[in-house]
Image (spheres, rainbow, N blue to C red):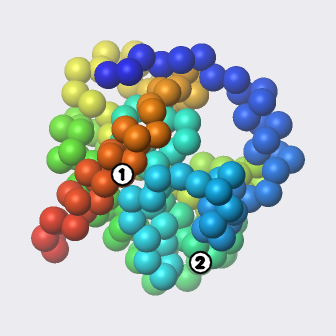
Amino acid sequence: MTSRQPFDLDAYVERATKGPCFICEMISGNPAFAHPIVAEDEETVTFLSKYPTLPGYCLVCPKAHVEDLAEGMSEAAYLGLQRKVHRLARALKQVFAAERIYVLSLGSQAANSHLHFHVVPLPAGVPLAQQQYHALMAEHGVLTIPDAEKAEMARTIAAALAALEDK
Ligand SMILES: [Zn+2]
């Protein structure tokens, strides 16, 4: 696996707090905010993180600029999104032989306010002290995966998703 490289958190926070919504920009096709897309339909988009701490680090988002999980989505819309999270988890488990699949909804009103779920495969064999938040925090470094490799990774996950049967 590619080793983690130091991450410039200050520059990232500067972009995230001052820039436009990166998810809305990506959805509108702004090339400056392009990410490798894994899956997309009318309501939801799934893509690879730009700053992955583990291979296969995905984000799943409603396409609409929803900020409030509790009040910004109906129960039906939320459950529809979570169905996609679960399917993605099944695909990631297969592709990365993951020991666990982490799922978190993060974001802030001050930065990255567009509702998004982190769905991340933890490979087998990571020492306990390096699992969980440690495994997810960019403060501990991010993987610099070449674009072609990321595109291939997105295609592989997409193919695994497409091959899943209903459960
Ligand atoms: Zn947005």
Per the image, label 1 sits on a secondary structure element best described as helix
User: Is 104 displayed left or right of 110 in the figure?
Assistant: left
- Tell me which residue sits at (43%, 77%) in the image: 41
Give the class, few, some or many, for how many residues have Cα within 10 Å of label 1's Cα (few <14, many ≥20): many
Q: Are marks 1 and 2 in contact (CB under 8 Å)?
A: no
Q: Secondary structure at mark 2?
A: loop
Residue 153 sits in which quadrant?
A: top left
Give x and y (percent) for residue 18: 86, 47
Residue 111: give x, y in percent of width and height: 76, 48
Q: Is mark 1 within 8 Å of ligand 1?
A: no
Q: Quadrant of the N terminus?
A: top left
> Three-letter amino acid code at disc 2?
Met
Disc marking residue 73: 2
Task: Say which of marks 1 and 2 sits in front.
Answer: 1
Can residue 44 be seen from the camera position used here?
yes
Visible residue check, residue 75: no
Task: Report the side of 125 relative to 128 (left or right).
Answer: left
The type of residue carrying mark 1 is Ala
Quadrant (top left/top right/bottom left/bottom right) for the C terminus: bottom left
Q: How many circles with numbers are drawn on the protein?
A: 2
**Disc on res. 129:** none
Which residue does the image show at 32% across and 46% down from the upper left? 152
Residue lying farthest right? Answer: 18
Q: Nearer the viewer, residue 62 or 24?
A: 24
Q: Which mark is residue 154?
A: 1
For image coordinates 73% across by 34% down, the residue present is 12
